[in-house]
């Protein structure tokens, strides 16, 4: 175990401080020779030298992973090309797209065939045809670089791909541009395993309803692509998302089913370990061999062979060996949540469960186990879930206690049904009828539990030191409750002291979350607007929600995929006010997705008049926008129209005033709410999409427009009034705009006019999110993409 920890420290060191691989290998060779000499001479330094060797090997492994970068394909970015390559990973099918990982050996550019090799992630949209592992595909399109995250803490998809050796992606919108041209002659055992999986999942799709089949495929094989977003959110809120990802729990059930079948068939005992190893290995191949399943399979195989050979089971050594094997091949796994959660929860279950059972000894042994396992799993996973996903479920323990027996039953019934279905499919229909009933019960339980008010709370990612302190106290629990080592009185004193210390640390952390500072976050939502204002008193105001194409109809897009996660990362559990500057989709389209998951006390909208038609108004709001407002009213959320002169009270130190419009305008852009926020000596001006005419009116009516920070109107379009910019005269001008948008925003003349005023210009398409903080006297500005400040 200690050598594994030292190896991990080496991987971390190599990641933080990149080192020359040659020198590290030379030092490692010297240490290896020294260790052999120390061992032969029976000196007491062998362990120390081996520890140093493991540390160096960790650094070498991390450095070697960085050298594997293959950037050949990057030279052909944004160029029309054709590629020929084999599907080297099971396709990831989603409701609206399919992802393929191709290993290419041929690139066609301008009629030339180039022998370029590398990996390409191909995404095919709106297609019903799904190719399989081992197919040779011909694809036309443009190679792209995966987008880098524009918002702080956002999932870095580019880094995720690059860690796996993938530096380019290719989106394909026309399914005619991808076709099968052959099949690899040999796919080996992986091909056989995935072919078997496809047959089994095909039986599930035939014998269960689509939603039920998607959930069972997630349970059995970790295939989550077809599970709806709503179901995924419910399972996440109930802290049951691990059910949908193959983990140690699933491997344990597979192993238990194998053992039961092995004894029922009365097979020779000598076959147990070899057969069990083969079953677990095939199962790992079917599920993609992620860190969690690989860890569980390695530990399961070691347990089988320890039983076969009559050796003592040593779970710390087995876990350490599993970690070293995974990190040797994939050192980047150490920094990803799947690896961290798998090992943390497994350690907790094996290390802490006996102590918790002892603590609950007044209950029967079966009940204590049912309570102890989910309790320990939640306790050990909590800080990592908070760090990576900014959420803690308050109903997770109860949800898992209630649901895990049902999940076990579902896996058993569905597993038996697909095995029988391979022989006689009508029997699978009959058996899965009962499986469907249990699945519906599970859906209902998870939905009900996740709908409880405050079922989960959002919080900012805790600092590393707090996570370390938390796990240190967990590690001390068995010692504190071991019999005979510490007196009862001293145990109570230590527990009370630990509880007080944790409360003080948590309290100091929460109290240090930017008090007496007003923070404005101009969120990168692509081509649209969304700005969060965090008041010094702790209240939260969101101005616009962003919105992607058709988000009013689909209710999924910028709102639930960008803005809501951003709010979660800041630990925001409710909005005091949501201002929708005007009805256009790129400003209000994300509202439905946010309000569905986050309580909102008040929604403020621009004046649009009464009825379906307004005399003199040329542009009317979309039907979907009016339906949105109607749904808000049905949910009991207060909706108020605002006009020039109205004010919002969100604390004694902050003034929020509406400057415009006085009433409905001839176009929706000019009806945008113009909001002025003053905190101390610092002023922010939010202008929606007002265009030249409305800007001119504001200037000519003598409205006080001066502001330190301006949200530039209409994404920096060319429809602006120069005198308006002069009246505002901002220190900083923020343009919320999408990359390569079809409108040509921002216009060059707009940029020129702002530069002539000496304003610092920040753009969400290049800088990412723009975060402005002020104490009422001075401004501090940071951006999501640090390198572009």
Image: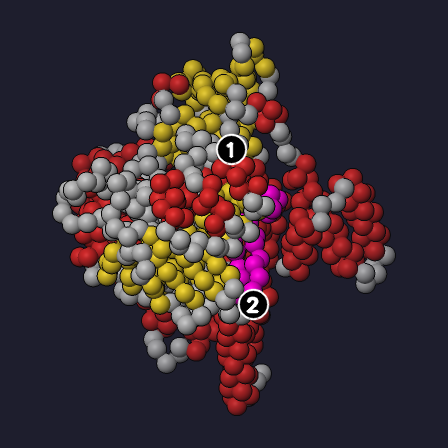
Magenta stretch containing residue 773, yes or no?
yes
Q: Label 1: state its secondary structure.
A: helix
Q: Is residue 747 left or right of residue 412?
A: right
Q: Is residue 151 left or right of residue 528?
A: right
Residue occupying image coordinates x 54% and y 14% = 109
Q: Quadrant of the N terminus?
A: bottom right
Residue occupying image coordinates x 46% and y 21% = 141
Q: Magenta segment, which residues?
A: 767-789
Residue 426 against residue 579 in the figure, above or below: above
Q: Residues within 10 Å of mark 2 (few under 14, many from 20)?
A: some
Residue identified by numbered label 1: 748
Residue occupying image coordinates x 53% and y 42% = 754
Between the C-alphas of marks 1 and 2, the distance is 48 Å
Disc sitting over residue 466 in the figure: 2
Tell me, what colour scheme is on the image?
A: secondary structure
Q: Nearer the viewer, residue 546 or 699?
A: 699
Residue 488 against residue 717 in the figure, above or below: below
User: How many numbered discs sit on the rendered protein?
Assistant: 2
């Amino acid at each position: 175990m200690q050598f594994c920890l030292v190896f991990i420290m080496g991987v971390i060191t190599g990641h933080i401080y990149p080192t020359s691989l040659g020198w590290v290998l030379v030092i490692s060779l010297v240490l290896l020779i020294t260790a052999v000499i120390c061992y032969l001479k029976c000196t007491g330094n062998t362990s120390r030298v081996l520890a140093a060797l493991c540390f160096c090997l960790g650094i070498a492994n991390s450095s070697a992973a960085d050298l594997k970068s293959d950037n050949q394909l990057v030279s052909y970015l944004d160029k029309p090309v054709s590629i020929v390559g084999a599907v080297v990973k099971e396709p990831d099918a989603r409701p609206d797209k399919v992802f393929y990982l191709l290993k290419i050996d041929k690139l066609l550019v301008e009629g030339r065939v180039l022998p370029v090799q590398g990996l390409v992630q191909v995404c095919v949209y709106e297609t019903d045809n799904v190719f399989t592992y081992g197919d040779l595909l011909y694809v036309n399109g443009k190679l792209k670089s995966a987008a880098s995250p524009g918002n702080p803490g956002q999932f870095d998809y580019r880094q995720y791909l690059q860690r796996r050796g993938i530096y380019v992606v290719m989106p394909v919108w026309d399914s005619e541009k991808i076709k099968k041209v052959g099949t690899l002659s040999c796919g080996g055992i992986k091909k056989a395993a995935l072919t078997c999986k496809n047959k089994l999942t095909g039986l599930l799709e035939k014998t269960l309803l689509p939603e039920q089949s998607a959930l069972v495929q997630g349970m059995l094989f970790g295939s989550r692509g077809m599970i709806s977003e709503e179901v995924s959110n419910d399972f996440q809120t109930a802290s049951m998302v691990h059910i949908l990802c193959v983990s140690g729990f699933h491997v344990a059930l597979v192993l238990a089913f194998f053992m039961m079948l092995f004894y029922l068939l009365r097979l020779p005992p000598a076959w147990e370990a070899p057969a069990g190893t083969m079953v677990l290995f095939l199962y790992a191949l079917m599920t993609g061999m992620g860190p969690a399943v690989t860890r569980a399979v390695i530990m399961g195989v070691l347990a089988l062979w320890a039983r076969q050979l009559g050796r003592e089971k040593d779970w710390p050594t087995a876990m350490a060996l599993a970690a070293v094997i995974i990190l040797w091949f994939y050192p980047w796994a150490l920094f990803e949540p799947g690896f961290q959660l798998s090992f943390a929860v497994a350690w907790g279950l094996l290390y802490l469960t006996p102590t918790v059972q002892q603590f609950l000894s007044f209950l029967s042994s079966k009940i204590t186990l049912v309570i102890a396992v989910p309790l320990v799993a939640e306790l050990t996973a909590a800080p990592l879930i908070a760090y990576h996903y900014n959420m803690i479920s308050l109903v997770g323990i109860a949800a898992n206690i209630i649901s895990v027996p049902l999940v076990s039953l579902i896996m058993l019934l569905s597993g038996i049904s697909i095995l029988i279905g391979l022989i006689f499919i009508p029997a699978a229909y009959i058996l899965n009828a009962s499986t469907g009933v249990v699945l519906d019960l599970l859906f209902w339980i998870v939905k009900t539990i996740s709908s409880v008010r405050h079922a989960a709370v959002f919080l900012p990612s805790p600092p590393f030191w707090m996570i370390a302190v938390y796990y240190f106290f967990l590690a001390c629990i068995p010692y504190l409750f071991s019999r005979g080592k510490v007196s009862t009185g001293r145990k109570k004193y230590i527990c009370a002291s630990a509880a007080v210390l944790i409360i003080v640390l948590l309290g100091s952390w929460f109290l240090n979350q930017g008090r007496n500072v007003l923070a404005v976050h101009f969120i990168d939502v692509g081509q649209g607007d969304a700005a969060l204002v965090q008041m010094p008193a702790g209240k939260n105001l969101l101005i616009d929600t962003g919105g992607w194409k058709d988000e009013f109809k689909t209710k999924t897009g910028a709102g639930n995929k960008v803005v809501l996660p951003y709010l979660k990362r800041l630990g925001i559990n409710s909005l005091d006010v949501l201002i929708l500057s005007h009805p256009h989709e790129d400003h209000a389209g994300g509202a439905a997705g946010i309000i569905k998951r986050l309580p909102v006390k008040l929604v403020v909208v621009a004046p649009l008049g009464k009825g379906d038609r307004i005399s003199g108004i040329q542009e009317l709001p979309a039907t979907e926008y009016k339906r949105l407002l109607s749904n808000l009213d049905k949910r009991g959320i207060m909706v108020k129209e605002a006009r020039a002169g109205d004010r919002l009270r969100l604390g004694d130190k902050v003034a929020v005033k509406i400057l415009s419009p006085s009433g409905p305008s001839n176009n929706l852009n000019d009806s945008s709410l113009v909001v002025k926020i003053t905190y101390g000596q610092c002023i922010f001006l939010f202008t929606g999409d007002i265009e030249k005419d409305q800007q001119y009116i504001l200037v000519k009516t003598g409205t006080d427009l001066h502001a330190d920070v301006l949200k530039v109107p209409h994404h920096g379009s060319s429809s602006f009034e120069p005198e308006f910019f002069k009246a505002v005269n901002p220190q900083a001008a923020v343009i919320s705009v999408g990359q390569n948008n079809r409108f040509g925003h921002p216009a060059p003349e707009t940029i020129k006019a702002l530069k002539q005023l000496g304003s610092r210009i920040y753009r969400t398409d290049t800088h990412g999110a723009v975060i402005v903080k002020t104490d009422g006297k001075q401004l501090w500005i940071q951006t999501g993409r640090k390198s572009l400040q």
